[in-house]
Image (cartoon, grey):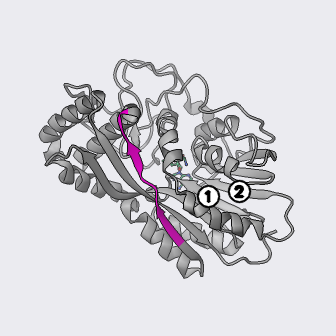
Amino acid sequence: MRKTATTPAGGTIPTQPGPRDATGASAPAQPPGPQSGIVSADGLDGAEGDMNGVAGPAGPDTDAVILGAGPSIRPGERATVRLRDAGPDDPPRYAPEWLELREGADAAARAHDLLDPLRIRLANLPGRAGLVIHDVGCGTGSMGRWLAPHLDGAQHWILHDRDPYLLHFAAVASPRSGADGSRVTVETRRGDIGRLTADALKGASLVTASALLDVLTREEVDTLAAACAGAGCPALLTLSVAGRVELTPSDPLDPEIADAFNAHQRRSGMLGPDAVTAAAEAFAEHGATVQVHPSPWQLGPGESALSAQWLRGWVGAAVEERPELRERADRYLSERLAACAAGELHVVVHHSDLLALCRPTGGAS
Ligand SMILES: C[S@@+](CC[C@H](N)C(=O)[O-])C[C@H]1O[C@@H](n2cnc3c(N)ncnc32)[C@H](O)[C@@H]1O
């Protein structure tokens, strides 16, 4: 596991950073969110007993961060689970604590303006008993917990992720009912978005995702758009990073850290801040009507825990990208964390939500 250097204010900046640092991730005793009614919670295809990656409790070496996504835990904090060692070509693993920590800010940020056009499209679907909604890159399922209570009618959610550990969290903490009290059921599917097909989405009313597009490559976004277009279903893709942050009070180092972070986001072909433009183009090429709305996190003193974790990940990724920043970044992070703890820091992290209304194919229902 990667070692980190502890800054005077307790911030951790990785000394040997790498992009796949969910190792050391700790799991809460209970999955996030309410326990709820699961009808089918285990459609793990080829799950290969992947919970064998879980071998907690972890030892003291538990100070890794998920770069660009948010750190998992700090030295001295209790880890209850350790994911299996990641190889150099393994994809990043996301700590459920990080996803849980951001869930409230995500819910507050998502663009409600896109819900009405979506509801109109869903209401006009022909001959449906209920909605079938695919949440791709579902993580622990926060999108369903947010969206299901905004939609009327019975809903069946199909939760997709490549990480079976997160799928289990998503299944047990799935939403119970829609806006009108109708039943919500879920199933999980383990798989890679890069291999998603229109056939896999057959019968879908909606494809949705949250905090996903910016960690995909252009090819994966093209695959997603082609699959949605082929299935004739709309896509609501929320909370993609826009590459802009505002910190108040400002610091002369802010722009340099932001640039380095954005460069880090684009590593390994990931789209990072280019994701929404790429997705809008990909869906438009398939004939979809695309709307984009801002969905910024607005983090004040009431969100200091999230701000602090975000800061550690943001600065850590910047230093990984540009190691020459380390000394100044250590000082910067210490001061930022101190301001955060004192309730004197406000952070706006800009995101975008995208609604793509694909042409109905007529064969989806
Ligand atoms: C930043 S997390 C967001 C999780 C969740 N949507 C949320 O908002 O809390 C990104 C999720 O996408 C999944 N993911 C990333 N790339 C993927 C891919 N190519 N195929 C399947 N899942 C992927 C990760 O495992 C992770 O659960």
* Residue 268 spot, x, y in % from top left: 37, 58
Q: Look at the numbered disc 1 and say if its residue's Cβ is closer than 8 Å to ligand 1.
A: no
Q: Residue at x 85, y 64 (%)?
A: 128
Q: Are marks 1 and 2 in contact (CB under 8 Å)?
A: yes
Residue 301 sits in quarter: top left
Kindly identify which residue carries mark 1: 208
Count residues near mark 2 (Cα–Cα under 10 Å), then give few for <14, some for 14-19, many for 20+: many
Quarter containing the N terminus: top left
Tell me the amino acid under the disc marked 1: Thr
Residue 177 position within the rendered picture, expressed as x and y whole percent measured from the top left? 76, 43
| Secondary structure mainly formed by the magenta segment | strand
Residue 88 visible in the shown view: no
Numbered marks: total: 2
Is 96 included in the stretch rendered in magenta?
Answer: no
Q: Nearer the viewer, residue 116 or 331?
A: 116
Say whether residue 48 is left or right of residue 253: right
Crowd class of label 1 (few under 14; some 14 to 19; many from 20; radius 10 Å): many
Query: Label 2's element?
Result: strand
Q: Where is residue 52, by image quadrant?
A: top right
Residue displayed at 56% across by 57% down: 112
Q: Residue 7 in the image: x percent, y percent?
A: 21, 28
Query: Is 274 displayed left or right of 202 in the figure?
Result: left
Residue 149 in sight in this render: yes
Name the residue: 52% across, 57% down.
111
- The residue wearing badge 2 is 133
Ligand 1 closer than 8 Å to label 2 CB: no
Q: Which residues are magenta?
A: 291-301
Mark linked to residue 353? none
Q: Nearer the viewer, residue 133 or 125?
A: 125
Query: Where's the C terminus, which quadrant?
Result: bottom right
Q: Secondary structure at mark 1?
A: strand
